[in-house]
Amino acid sequence: MHRGSIKEVLHLVRDYRTLLSGYFVILVMATVSEGFGLGMLLPIMETATGKGGDSFFTRKVQGLFELAGLEFSLPSLAAVLGLALVAKYGLVMCAMHLARVVSARATRDLREQAFRNIMDLPLSYFYRTKPGDLVATQFNSAQNAGAIFEYGANLLNGVFFCLLYLAINSLISFWLTLIVVAVAGASYFFILPRFRVGFRKGDEEKAVMDDVNSYLYDTLSGIKTVKAFDNSVSHINKYQTRIDRYRDLSIEIVDNRIVVFFFNEPVLVLLAIGLLVAAVRFFGIPFSSVLVFLVVLIQILPKVKLINNNWLAVQEFLPHLARIGALIDRRDKQYLPEGSVRVESMEGDIRFESVSFRYPQREEFALSDVSVVIEKGSTVAVVGPSGGGKTTFVDLLLRLHDPTEGTIRVDGVALPDIRSGDWRRLIGVVEQDPYLFNDTVSTNIRYGKPDVTGEEMEQAAKLAYAHDFIEKLPEGYESFVGNRGLKLSGGQKQRIALARALIREPELLVLDEATSALDSEFERLIQTAIHQLRGRMTIVVVAHRLSTVRDADKILVIEGGRIVESGKHETLMDKKGRYRDLVNLQAGSDQ
């Protein structure tokens, strides 16, 4: 067991120590009941044969019966044995239920904690992590990690009862019991490697499971592209390769369990035969005592199997626990610290003061020494070639990242000092390829502000020039949009996304390449909507089509991570600099 896995186990044990303590108490009571029941076997046999006896168990039972005022007879002994067995099975059932409760609660809590942590992870983390891996870890690994409690409880059950059976047999014959322990212990040298194989196979299974889930998620997310390029057969073949590996690994894991499962049984059967001969010929033990000894020894066999199987299962699932634990306890260096300053509105300007930013694990800066003022109520356009830093500029403004160097200030307050929730409530965002959830139009618009009225929702749709086409849908606002808005056109998706942003009544509206993929008609509608909003809020437009930014109060030309030009359209055209080159280049390509 790896050190990290031990840490995670101890962490979970601490979280559920009350329930686990209850399980431990119930298990002890069940063990005592089982021990008391088995202890009755020898007095019953001696009483039934009429030979009496001076065995340890018979003397103790007689003393207990006298103390309780009960008659020491076969019916009384049988009745007490029955009660002990009923109590034992009842307690074992309670213990099994409690183990399942702990396992289910642990699974649920691990999933919740993992999901909360995923929501708090910085955006940069998702740039380098496959969503399918996160889905597999959050759901499947949490399931298997929670199951460790149940397997661990079963393991503890087997250990307790095995120790009980050995204790009872040692009272019958210490030397015979010592032989059993020695032979069983020696046999474990042959199966210990199987436990190490179990851990390694569990680790491999986790990796393959993540790969299968990730590939499936990626393929289904891009199903339109898959079909458009007629690559279904290729994806089927690649998926088949992955699930074939998972199948083979599952068989290997079961084969490993089978070896452990059946190894001890022949050893114990042969041991029982040998002990029977040794007890009668060499130790002179009475037949009734030998018979009870063998009955108790036979009880050990299923418990040994229980120990082996559950220990193997724990070993196989430990990699899942380590993975989910690492996700929950992740302390990424790019975590954004929470600010403490409360804001309800944006009263003044937004200032970038010598801002530079570099993505993790990259040497070059995406933005370098950017200084700019975005006046309240103004419309600022950000233009430039692809990869120049436009998206990074917007992400910093949204505080999806913090600057590596320099400061962004809002009303004179450093942006990292402002509570992130307060800041983002002031912002509405429309992206180049807006994500629409597989739900109704109404749900997607209300996502911007869930508690709005139907009238407010329709007003936002009208501002975004979306109301008319929504009314023509089969179910109107209650029409389903499909996965990622697959049932809608690009222009319809953009207008719903704009309505979703406007329903928040934002003080800062960010349009990130919102018209770059639209045809002229839809672009005109979006431009009209933006024009009507000018002056009512601060607008930042990231644009690929320069025709959409001519009327902006300020145009920022970002290239190579720097602002190379800044000013109005006419001023920048007169400069005959980089902006004019971009305009002429685009005009030429449009002809």
Image (tube, helix red, strand yellow):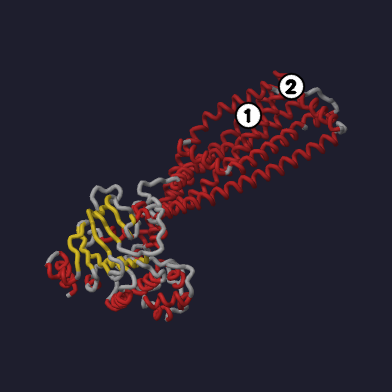
Q: Disc number at residue 285?
A: 2
Q: Position of residue 433 (x, y in %)?
A: 34, 66
- Left or right relative to 62: residue 141: left
Tell me the distance, in whole angstroms, between the alpha carbons under discs 2 and 1. 19 Å
Q: Amino acid at mark 1?
A: Leu
Q: Disc number at residue 588?
A: none
- Left or right relative to 8: residue 539: left
- Vertical comparison of 228 with 288: above or below: below
Query: Quarter-wise, where is residue 504 in the image?
Result: bottom left
Q: Amino acid at mark 2?
A: Ile
What kind of element bears circle 1?
helix
Q: Which residue is mark 1?
A: 270
- Left or right relative to 320: residue 231: left
Q: Position of residue 301 (x, y in %)?
A: 64, 35
Q: Quadrant of the C terminus?
A: bottom left
- Vertical comparison of 282 with 527: above or below: above
Q: Position of residue 434 (x, y in %)?
A: 36, 66
- Left or right relative to 464: residue 143: right
Of residues 562 and 201, which is closer to you in this image?
Answer: 562
